[in-house]
Image (tube, rainbow, N blue to C red):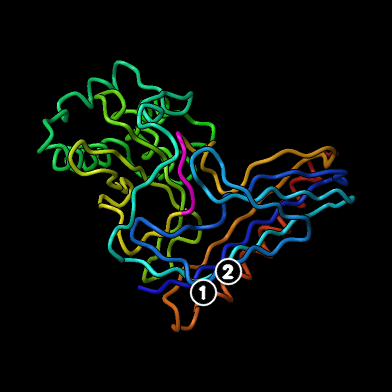
Amino acid sequence: MLLSIEHHTRYVYSDMVNYTIQQLRLTPQNGFGQHVKRWEIKVAGALHPTEDAYGNSTHTLVVDKPHQEILIIAMGDVETGLEVASQHQNLPLSIYLRETPLTESDDAIRAFAQPFKADVYGQSAALEDMMHALLAQVNYLTGATQVTTSAIEAFRQGQGVCQDHAHIFIACCRSIGLPARYVSGYLFTVDGSLMQTHAWADVYLTNGGWQSFDVSNGCLAGEMHVRLATGLDYRSASPVSGMRTGGGVEGMASSVIVNQAGVPISQQRQIDTLELAHHAELMRQAQQMQQ
């Protein structure tokens, strides 16, 4: 499947920003069943390409002139559903057993995961069972959590979004001795219902290498998924992170179009309208908080 992607991220500020530096993990790479045909990042600032410790293709964005808004557009075409290429990795597997503040496990998570611990040949099936059990226990609910919500907190309240499902699943896997990592990326839906980035988890199976589990959709990641970056958790794989000097109150809006190449993008007008509405609302909120 050939997918065309357009991802807009807009930051607005109540005051002038003097300096911004951001890390962009917005460039998909070849491998894991995908091949990048074309990709570019458009932004009014200097971009410096590099590769991070996890092997992600990253760009450092520097805006050193006064500004009150930043618009980042990442776009291109990615072919998916290909045979899995090399699973080469930069770091030893033991790194992916490390807990982080977002992926720590507690007694409840460990007790939940323990029944799904299986021998070498039963790991894949057991993890699929755990994925479905987790989805039944932690309902998908937009707005129930924040990017700072930990796996323990989301599991305790029984609600969350794809980020929370990934964090909890990773915590479960690490608690039973399986290396696991967070994946950020995009998901194609026929009806265009997901207009944002997506998240899932990779788990290293003893006899099968990395396998990808999309807990929120109760399936293995496949041709509908486009990978952007991996890390120990959201913080190390988030599409955009950074810091600034000045700016007062910050507002952020993001929109994503994932469409089959050659098919008219029917959501484009809707996305543009939503972006304008988000922009106006973010500025209104920022100005109110300054008063």
What residue is rendered at 35% in x and 55% in y? 32
Spot occupied by residue 287 in the image (x, y as percentages of width and height)? 81, 46
Quadrant of the image occupied by residue 114: top left
Q: Report the side of 222 relative to 60 (left or right).
A: left
> Which of the pair 245/155 is nearer the observer?
245
Image marks 1 and 2: residues in contact by CB distance under 8 Å: yes
Q: Quadrant of the C terminus?
A: top right
Residue of label 1? 267
Q: Amino acid at mark 1?
A: Gln
What residue is rendered at 65% in x and 45% in y? 23
Mark sitting on residue 271: 2
What residue is rendered at 47% in x and 57% in y? 29
Q: Quadrant of the N terminus?
A: bottom left
Q: Residues within 10 Å of mark 1 (few under 14, many from 20)?
A: some
Spot occupied by residue 63 in the image (x, y as percentages of width and height)? 81, 50
Mark 1 and mark 2: Cα distance apart in space? 6 Å
Give the secondary structure at mark 2: helix
Q: Which residues are magenta?
A: 228-232
> Which of the pair 2/250 is nearer the observer?
2
Give the secondary structure at mark 1: loop
Quadrant of the image occupied by residue 30: bottom left
Q: Is residue 100 magenta?
A: no
Q: Report the side of 94 relative to 123 (left or right).
A: right
